Image: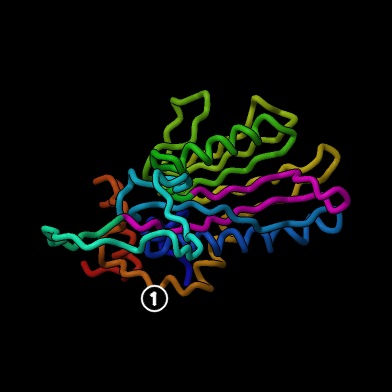
Amino acid sequence: MPSPFPGMDPYLEHPDFWQETHNRLIIAIADTIMPQIRPKYEVAIDKRIYEITDPNDSNSDSLLVGIPDIAIKRQSNNPNIPTGSVATLNITLPTTVKVPAPEKIKQTYLEVREMATKQVVTAIEILSPVNKRSGEGRITYLKKRQSILGSLTNLVEIDLLRKWESMPILNNSIQSDYRVLVSPSNRRPFAELYAFNLRDSLPIFPLPLREEDVEPIVNLPEIFGGIYDRAGYDYRIDYDREPVPSLSEEDRVWATQILQEKELRDN
């Protein structure tokens, strides 16, 4: 059964579904483009790791790398060092508290590499909350993004999340719920932006490679429809509830009408 929505299903932006959807999209895109680019190119699925202190705090994502102020090292046994002394102490009883233990977030992305040289020709990114919300995760991603944009590597950036700030472009007047940025290296600083909203269909776009290559087609509607069906989202999603993040009032009314027409929500 297909998604009831014509394009992106906003219910898949929920934290309970997004990571799975992200990973399924990565694999589905790789499987779709591979037959179109072989044998000259290969598609590699890679990952980067973020550590956040509190996964429920949208402002806490940070890369936890550092050196402790005091380190206790194990020493060899030395009979000349006293083992302790006897003293009378006033003991303060402790209170049990909770410390922010880091949680690792693994985020996958795609690289199209030339078989002969292993050089990365095109990077494909599907944005996640750790990329978009403020903090070290966004800063780290923006540094990688800027490095790609300053290189000979093509960039495809897919943003299917309504929440948080979009990735920067020079024309900031463009507003949309979702977007796909296609940036061929030979056209910079110009790029193609597919800006679309909840009520629109997902875009179909060419994947940039080398100038002499025929560009493979990324059919997002077909890819998305396939993963929705294979994941069984039609019976796993509770469409009687409101989506998270919430919709605008106008989109909420529109979505409710669609769900009622498809008998996925009670009147």
The structure residue drawn at horizontal position 45% and vertical position 65%, both measured from the top left corner, is 79
Task: Look at mark 1 in the image and give the residue it sits on.
Answer: 235
Residue 184 image offset from top left, x and y in percent: 70, 35
- Does the magenta portion include 124? yes
Q: In this view, does 116 lie to the left or right of 130?
A: right
Residue 122, by quadrant, is: top right
Q: Is residue 107 left or right of residue 250?
A: right
Residue 66 image offset from top left, x and y in percent: 47, 44
- The amino acid type of the residue labelled 1 equals Tyr
Is residue 9 in view from this perspective?
yes
The structure residue drawn at horizontal position 54% and vertical position 62%, both measured from the top left corner, is 23
Residue 103 image offset from top left, x and y in percent: 41, 59
Q: Which of 108 and 99 is in front in this view?
A: 99
Q: In this view, does 267 lie to the left or right of 124?
A: left
Quarter of the image with the C terminus in it:
bottom left
Q: How many labels does the image show?
A: 1
Where 148 sits versus 58, above or below? above
Q: Which of 24 and 241 is in front in this view?
A: 24
Q: Give the range drawn in magenta.
A: 100-127
